[in-house]
């Protein structure tokens, strides 16, 4: 605590140095300075408002796009403290916005939304914004402060009177830092919808001032979330099982039911952050379900058919959809994308809480218990039958068969290091690609418009889809637990589809397929997205291919009039030479490498927004068009 004695100016210098560091190495604090980092700033401020709601004070949270590149978040909580901090000699507001990691130092106790990169704090947003304006309503007054690039521009001062309380933060990300400068409404909407399910009782509002659009997200909690996700699937029992449990610092909410599908969907959150990679809380849930369902089945003499065997974890989870939200202080996150809970106490807490409540539920709802157990027994029997069949036949499955799909135009080289597979949407584009390619190193696999939606269908059906089988056998690395990237016949697998909404849809389907069935290929960086040009511009003899609307604007400005502009609606509109030059030639093309995070997001969108919900398809496709357009290299 030696710091307490240092004087104000020394403090101020230290503070400034801290935020200069953030500007020098922004990626260390927010991951990157592309689309994701840009949106991260908003999530950071939104998290602070959500913390105030989780602490029980804020009931309304509004996100506003102002149309000038700035965004604001407003809550009606207590308002950030305005009085002068005794040790630092500056107002609470200035502490929050200029001291790095204020969150940790001034421990707000409750469940801070802080995991992975979250929780780096408002000071990072200030450091990386051209300007930040803070309005606090508290103690009968309206207060205002302004900051710019980490510095105080207008210290906190009163500007009026009010009997309300709350905090409003408006900021404009700094164009000196961020390449990306556009707010993605789909992304913001998705997060607000998700938050409305996770923080029930809070009304989330989204306003776009440039169009006047206003949306409200408000819900009754995880049961609503569950029904939203499984809209269109028939539940085996209703209403769903729902529980809340609080013990010390831990708080758990769980909703689950079973549907006629046979996959497993456990969607888990920790302090409102989705834990895509699961973790100890999910392990606890699984353990409880296996234990309690077996106990019940045994006690009611329901396992005779299994001849002494018990139900496996997989058996009891066929058709399960569960949403689990655990709140705990200082969660430990692990894993590739820091979305796996590592805190070990979470496992025992969830396991014993769920076991107790779910046991009671089964006793009180014998029909539900019956349905769950019958389904699990069916799963166990078909698993056993499938195993027997495999042992009996002992032939190579189609997945590892030596025959390559008929539509594949393979390359000559057999060296995976230099071999590339282009998965091309549409037979006509496939034809052009075959003519355009370098036969030595490039293979072409044309696929038809609609591959099966991986999310909608059960694994068996997905794998019976001809397009999916062609992809799997062309790559040859196997799937699921047997997927081994070192067996891949190609070092690069390149998704090549049109730069329109349908193309985006297909890219997302393929990404989801890879993520669910050949995850190591994604993790080890085998998957790429080809970037065909959007425009060809010509003036006199000068020709240029353009890959974005921004580039087009620039050419229009710089080349002046008489520019011929051709807009490519699809790959099919390019002749083979053009396709080679712009999209396939390793010397001149641009490829985007798919990162784990990209696949996680595609998967997240699927698991949260798709299912069998056909009505939401349009909205979904629009979102993904955005998402894929903005993939980071
Ligand atoms: C638009 C974003 O940031 N809302 C916030 C509060 C409330 C308190 C607080 C925030 C005190 C000194 C750390 C109020 N009264 N919305 C927001 N609402 N921060 S941020 O305190 C911050 C601590 O530094 C608050 C009593 N305790 C806490």
Image (spheres, rainbow, N blue to C red):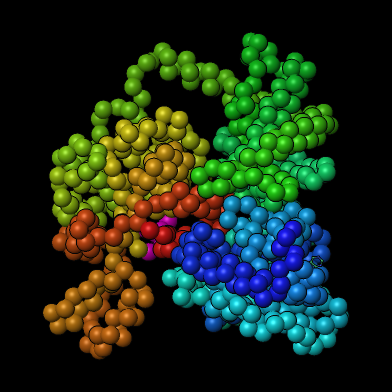
Q: Which quadrant holds residue 574?
A: bottom left
Left or right of residue 496, residue 53 in this image: right
Left or right of residue 527, residue 572 in this image: left
Instruction: Give the image quadrant in which the ligand numbered 1 is located.
Output: bottom right
| Image quadrant in which the N terminus is located | bottom right
Residue 225 in the image, given as x and y percentages of width and height: 68, 51
Q: Measured along the vertical axis of the image, is residue 91 above or below residue 160?
A: above
Q: Out of 357 and 365, give the one closest to the viewer.
A: 357
The residue that appears at 45% across and 30% down in the rendered structure is 481
Q: Measured along the vertical axis of the image, is residue 215 above or below residue 154?
A: above
The residue that appears at 54% across and 61% down in the rendered structure is 30
The residue that appears at 50% across and 49% down in the rendered structure is 600
User: Is residue 228 located in the magenta-colored stretch of the structure?
Assistant: no
Q: Which quadrant holds residue 246?
A: top right
Left or right of residue 326, residue 547 in this image: left
Q: Main secondary structure of the magenta part?
A: helix
* Outermost top residue: 307
Q: How many marks?
A: 0
Q: Out of 321 and 40, give the one closest to the viewer.
A: 40
Please say whether residue 192 is visible from this viewpoint: no
Q: Which quadrant holds residue 468?
A: top left
Residue 520 in the image, given as x and y percentages of width and height: 42, 39
| Image quadrant in which the C terminus is located | bottom left
Please say whether residue 438 is visible from this viewpoint: yes
Left or right of residue 532, residue 437 in this image: left
Residue 107 in the image, given as x and y percentages of width and height: 75, 57
Q: Out of 429 and 52, give the one closest to the viewer.
A: 52
The residue that appears at 79% across and 75% down in the rendered structure is 84
Q: Report the magenta residues as a range.
A: 500-506
Q: Out of 151 and 36, give the one closest to the viewer.
A: 151
Residue 119 in the image, given as x and y percentages of width and height: 64, 58
């Amino acid at each position: 605590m030696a710091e307490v004695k240092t004087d104000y100016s020394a403090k101020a210098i230290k503070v400034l140095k801290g935020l200069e560091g953030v500007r020098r190495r922004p990626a260390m604090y927010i991951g990157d300075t592309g689309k994701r980092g840009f949106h991260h700033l908003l999530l950071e401020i939104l998290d602070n408002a959500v913390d105030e709601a989780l602490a029980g004070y804020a009931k309304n949270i509004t996100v506003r796009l102002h149309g000038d590149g700035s965004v604001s978040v407003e809550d009606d909580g207590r308002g950030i403290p305005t009085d002068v901090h005794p040790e630092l000699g500056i107002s609470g507001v200035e502490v929050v916005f200029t001291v790095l990691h204020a969150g940790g130092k001034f421990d707000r106790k409750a469940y801070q939304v802080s995991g992975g990169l979250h929780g780096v704090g408002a000071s990072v947003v200030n450091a990386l914004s051209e300007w930040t304006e803070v309005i606090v309503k508290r103690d009968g007054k309206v207060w205002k402060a302004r900051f710019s690039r980490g510095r105080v521009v207008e210290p906190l001062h009163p500007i009026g009177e009010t009997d309300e309380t709350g905090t409003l933060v408006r900021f404009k990300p700094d164009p000196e830092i961020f390449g990306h400068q556009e707010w993605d409404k789909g992304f913001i909407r998705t997060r607000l919808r998700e938050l409305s399910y996770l923080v029930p009782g809070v009304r989330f509002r989204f306003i776009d001032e440039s169009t006047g659009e206003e949306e409200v997200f408000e819900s009754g909690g995880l049961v609503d979330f569950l029904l939203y996700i499984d809209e269109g699937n028939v539940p085996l029992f209703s209403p769903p099982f729902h529980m809340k449990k609080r013990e010390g610092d831990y708080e758990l909410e769980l909703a689950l039911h079973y549907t006629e599908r046979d996959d497993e969907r456990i969607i888990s959150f920790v302090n409102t952050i989705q834990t895509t990679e699961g973790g100890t809380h999910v392990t606890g849930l699984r353990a409880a379900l296996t234990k309690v369902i077996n106990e019940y089945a045994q006690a009611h003499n329901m396992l005779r058919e299994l001849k002494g065997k018990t139900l496996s974890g997989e058996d009891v989870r066929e058709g399960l959809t569960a949403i689990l939200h655990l709140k705990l202080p200082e969660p430990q996150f692990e894993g590739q994308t820091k979305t796996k809970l590592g805190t070990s106490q979470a496992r025992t807490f969830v396991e014993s809480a769920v076991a107790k409540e779910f046991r009671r539920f089964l006793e009180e709802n014998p029909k539900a218990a019956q349905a769950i157990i019958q389904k699990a027994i069916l799963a166990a029997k078909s698993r056993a039958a499938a195993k027997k069949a495999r042992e009996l036949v002992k032939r190579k499955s189609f997945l590892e068969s030596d025959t390559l799909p008929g539509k594949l135009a393979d390359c000559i080289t057999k060296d995976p290091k230099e071999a590339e597979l282009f998965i091309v949407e549409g037979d006509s584009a496939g034809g052009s690609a075959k003519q355009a390619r370098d036969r030595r190193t490039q293979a072409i696999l044309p696929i038809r418009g609609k591959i099966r939606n991986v999310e909608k269908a059960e694994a068996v059906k997905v794998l019976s889809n001809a397009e999916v089988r062609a992809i799997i056998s062309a790559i040859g690395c196997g799937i699921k637990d047997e997927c081994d990237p070192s067996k891949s016949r190609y070092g690069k697998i390149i998704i090549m589809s049109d730069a329109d909404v349908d193309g985006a849809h297909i890219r997302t389907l393929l990404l989801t397929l890879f993520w669910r069935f050949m995850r190591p290929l994604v993790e080890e960086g085998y998957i790429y997205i080809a970037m065909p040009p959007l425009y060809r511009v010509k003036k006199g003899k000068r020709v240029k291919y353009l890959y974005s609307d921004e580039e087009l604007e620039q050419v229009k400005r710089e080349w002046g009039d008489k520019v011929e502009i051709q807009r490519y609606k699809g790959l099919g509109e390019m002749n083979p030479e053009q396709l080679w030059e712009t999209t396939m030639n390793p010397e001149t093309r641009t490829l985007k490498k798919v990162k784990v995070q990209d696949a996680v997001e595609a998967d997240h969108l699927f698991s949260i927004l798709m299912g069998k919900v056909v009505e939401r398809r349009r909205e979904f496709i629009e979102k993904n068009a955005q998402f894929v357009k903005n993939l980071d290299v």
